[in-house]
Image (cartoon, helix red, strand yellow):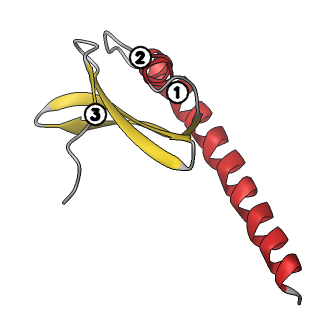
Amino acid sequence: MSIKARILTAFSIVLLLLSLTDAMAERGSRRGAAESDNYSLDSAVSKARKRSKGGRVVRAETGERDGRRTHNIRIYKDGRVKRYRMDAETGRLTRPDRKR
């Protein structure tokens, strides 16, 4: 297999994975809307996309941190993935601490 074909195959796989994770994020946002939080996963995703000025949602999920429900969002833009966290009760959107 030529190098050009390998690059094209790798690029196709990345696009497929991005579309799958986008579909998974959409499914997660529908599930989050049914929960009784003050701020839904949909609103967290909207706020994170607005803060990052666009981009593609790679992952969106609801979890728990320090005894509080949080929405965790990852957005791919300009070759980087930015992570955001929203407190589901207050709606406060923050960028999580970076790993060292």
Q: Residue furthest left?
A: 66
> Closer to the camera, 8 or 22?
8
C-alpha gap between disc 1 and disc 2: 8 Å
Which residue is disc 2 drawn over?
40
Q: In this view, does 85 lie to the left or right of 75?
A: left
Secondary structure, mark 2, is loop
Q: Residues within 10 Å of mark 2 (few under 14, many from 20)?
A: many
Secondary structure under badge 1? helix
Label 1 to label 3: alpha-carbon separation? 19 Å
Q: Which amino acid does label 1 sit on?
A: Ser
Say whether residue 23 is left or right of residue 75.
Answer: right
Q: In which quarter of the image is residue 43?
A: top left
Mark 1 / mark 3, whichever is N-terminal: 1
Q: Which residue is drawn at 71% across and 46% down?
A: 19
* Image quadrant in which you'd find residue 78: top right
Q: Do the residues labelled 1 and 2 touch (CB within 8 Å)?
A: yes
Q: Which of marks 3 and 2 is nearer the N terminus?
A: 2
> Separation of disc 3 and disc 2 at Cα?
18 Å
Rendered-image quadrant of the C terminus? bottom left
Amino acid at the residue labelled 2 = Ser
Query: Closest to the observer: 19 or 12?
Result: 12
The residue identified by callout 1 is 29
Disc 3: which residue: 95
- Using a 10 Å C-alpha cutoff, classify the residue at mark 1 as few (fewer than 14 neighbours), some (14 to 19) or many (20 or more): many
Residue at 66% from the left image edge and 50% from the top image edge: 18
Residue 11, percent from left and from top: 76, 64
Q: State the residue at coordinates (35%, 33%).
A: 84
Quadrant into which the N terminus falls:
bottom right
